[in-house]
Image (cartoon, rainbow, N blue to C red):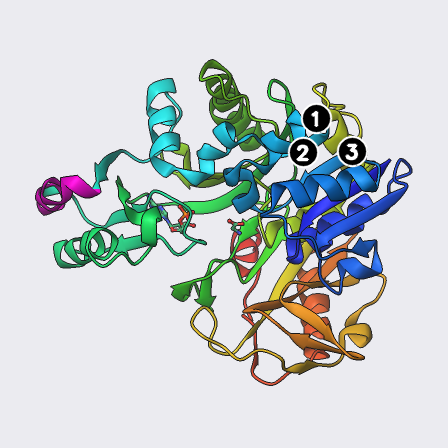
Amino acid sequence: MNVVLIGSGGREHALARKISKSKSLSKLYILPGNPGTGALGENVNVDVSNFDETYNFCFENEISFVIIGPEQPLVDGLGDFLIEKGLKVFGPTKAAAQIEGDKSFSKNLMKNYGIPTASFEVFDKEDYENALTYVKTAKYPLVVKASGLAAGKGVLICEDQNSAVSAIKECFKDGAFGAAGDKVVVEEFMYGFEASLFAITDGTDFISLPIAQDHKRIGDGDTGKNTGGMGAYAPAPLVDSKLQEEVEKIIIQPTLDAMKSENAPFVGCLYCGLMITSEGPKVVEFNCRFGDPETQVVLPLLEGDFLQLLYSAAAGKIDKNSVKYSGGAAICVVASSKGYPGSYKKGLKITGIEDAESEEIVVYHAGTKKEGNDIVTSGGRVLGVTAVSKENDLKACKTKAYEGIDKIKFDGIYFRKDISDKAFQNLD
Ligand code: AMP
Ligand code: GLY
């Protein structure tokens, strides 16, 4: 089949790499893609926010399957539009994508269906005074979240009343997150360790992939500002198969059942951000798509036909045997631009990518573009250097990933030095 993959980040490079290995693939187009995906299929500069233009491209190129990578087009309803035109789509409808696009929706869903998560209250912009009264009597730390999509930046962890009052003000009065902050979720702070689980689902049935751990803060030792993710590893030894089964039983299956009951069956990749607390696993957040950079470490650990897995889910009957865990491990270290997650320079020449790559190391492109014969930076998160070990040897993987990234040079390159150390603390 001819396949369209939508997106342009490291996640899409990892998806394209896996899909390109499928026997059922004829031609892969990536809209708009990046220099990494360009080596695996054809990048085409279609404006995916224009639904008609996207559909026309699919029609003219005899596309039978569309995979939507990022959350924005899903939340905007691109999936619904293409499904209505008769295409098979991997990715939820607009109604189901609310699970990420509107945190108040997902929190209420969890509350109503008994899915474990932090206790919370929701406030509208008009409830400004009530929100202030609430945070004056709440327990600290407290978490204030913009309810809408805020590119991972809308979560404010407040140590005391003053910072909670500022956070509410930032959302309601200063418009720091635009319309995404017109509704706010104020929730209890959860203690524990975090893990990310991807459930691939046809809406009823699902399989969960190896568990990953992300590194969201910019600095070593989880310090500094939150980012889109500075690195990841999988599988996370902290979540053994018994715990994974518990998560499937008390979180994933009930969530899929709840979405069906709400007339919003979820088809695609349900990303579950977990907090493993002393009371058991709880949901930090749901996303309606694959995580980035978790995808870059989870997908290399799958054997089988990944395209068949996604297609069967989109077609309504997931083929649970199409992939299996290889038994290996992977680590991805993100190379970012100096200044990220704040402002940073673009257009800086990158060298050493080919040098860094080997049979065990893949360099995923995220914020790069071609300029003549050069690859230059075009984003905050620039590359993701991923090392894979067939033997589930995380330590060897870490050494390899850092050997790889040391070969890559661009002005102001920055990366964390401690990706995956959390796993070793537990293993030693
Ligand atoms: P989110 O975008 O909701 O995943 O939040 C971003 C990050 O903020 C998470 O990965 C957690 O590290 C942290 N966080 C969010 N909600 C909570 C919570 N209720 N308790 C503790 N940490 C949280
Ligand atoms: N790595 C976090 C996310 O994809 O939202």
Q: Quadrant of residue 305?
A: top right
Residue 135 lies in magenta, yes or no?
A: yes
Residue at the extreme bottom of the image, as rendered: 411
- Asked if the residue under mark 2 is in contact with the one under mark 3, i.e. CB atoms within 8 Å, the reply is no
Give the residue at x 69% y 64%: 365
Q: What residue type is labelled 1?
A: Ala
The residue tagged 1 is: 313
Secondary structure found at label 1: helix
Q: Can residue 50 be seen in this view?
A: yes
Q: Can residue 326 be seen in this view?
A: no
Residue 36's place in the image compared with 18, above or below, is below
Secondary structure found at label 2: strand
Give the residue at x 13% y 54%: 161
The label nearer to you, 1 versus 2, is 2
Dot 3 crowding, Cα within 10 Å, few <14, some 14–19, many 20+: some
Q: How far apart are marks 3 and 1 (CA)?
A: 13 Å
Tell me the quarter of the image containing the C terminus. Answer: bottom right
- Asked if the residue under mark 2 is in contact with the one under mark 1, i.e. CB atoms within 8 Å, the reply is yes
Q: Does the residue labelled 3 lie within 8 Å of ligand 2?
A: no
Residue 425's place in the image compared with 148, above or below, is below
Secondary structure found at label 3: strand
Q: What residue type is labelled 2?
A: Phe
The residue tagged 2 is: 90
Of the two numbered discs 3 and 1 on the same chain, state the one appearing first in sequence: 1
The residue tagged 3 is: 323
Residue 55, position as x, y percentages in the image: 70, 39
The label nearer to you, 3 versus 1, is 1
Q: Does the residue labelled 1 lie within 8 Å of ligand 2?
A: no
In the drawing, what numbered circle is on residue 390? Answer: none
Residue span colored magenta? 125-136
